[in-house]
Image (cartoon, rainbow, N blue to C red):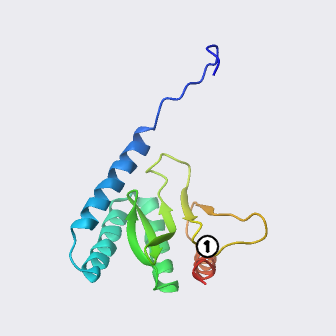
Amino acid sequence: MSSTESSTYEGFTAEERAAMKEHAQDQKKAARRGSRADKAAEAARDVLAKIAEMQDSDRIMAERVHAVITATAPALAPKLWYGMPAYTLDGKIVCHFQSAAKFKTRYATLGFSDQANLDEGAMWPAAFALTEVTPEVEARISALVKQAVS
């Protein structure tokens, strides 16, 4: 980099550092749990508790997204991932919800990992902006989740 360049790397934002710390705490907490069933039940409770902590609009959307995902694909197991609700299949993240407030963004996001079977040609969306969850949005989420786990 040239010394005349005005932008410099300043590291991770406070929000990014907080998310990484939350992820480390989640991992430590999960490692201390007992049986696989206990771990799954506690992880599901952790997700619901995290959703309950969210600000109103994010919480309402996260509750609906959670309900749609768990109803559509009961094989997906809820767990926290970087302090946000995520859904796994065989221990691998398939999709996750990111609140707008967490990273001070304009909208919440429903994201899908490379584990999701959403492949469509040479390019396809892997994240979707959410400003509200209407019946039409719920139907789209349901269809995406079905496709992701097929």
**Left or right: 9 in relation to 59:** right
Residue occupying the far right of the picture: 121
Observer-nearest of 91 and 77: 91
Q: Position of residue 54 (x, y in %)?
A: 38, 59
Quarter of the image for residue 42 reads bottom left
Residue beneath the point at 75% across and 72% down: 120
> On screen, 146 above or below 119?
below
Determine whether, in the image, residue 91 is placed left or right of residue 52. Answer: right
Q: Residue 102, image x and y in percent? A: 43, 51
Residue 146 horizontal/vertical position (percent): 60, 82
Q: Name the residue carrying label 1.
A: 137
In this picture, residue 37 sits left or right of residue 116: left
Q: In the picture, which quadrant includes the C terminus? A: bottom right
Residue 121's spot in the image, x, y percent?
79, 70
Q: Is residue 92 above or below residue 102?
A: below
How many numbered tags mark residues here? 1
Q: Quadrant of the N terminus?
A: top right
Q: Nearer the viewer, residue 111 or 21?
A: 21
- Mark 1: few, some, or many residues within 10 Å (few <14, many ≥20)? some
Residue type (three-letter) at the residue carrying disc 1: Val
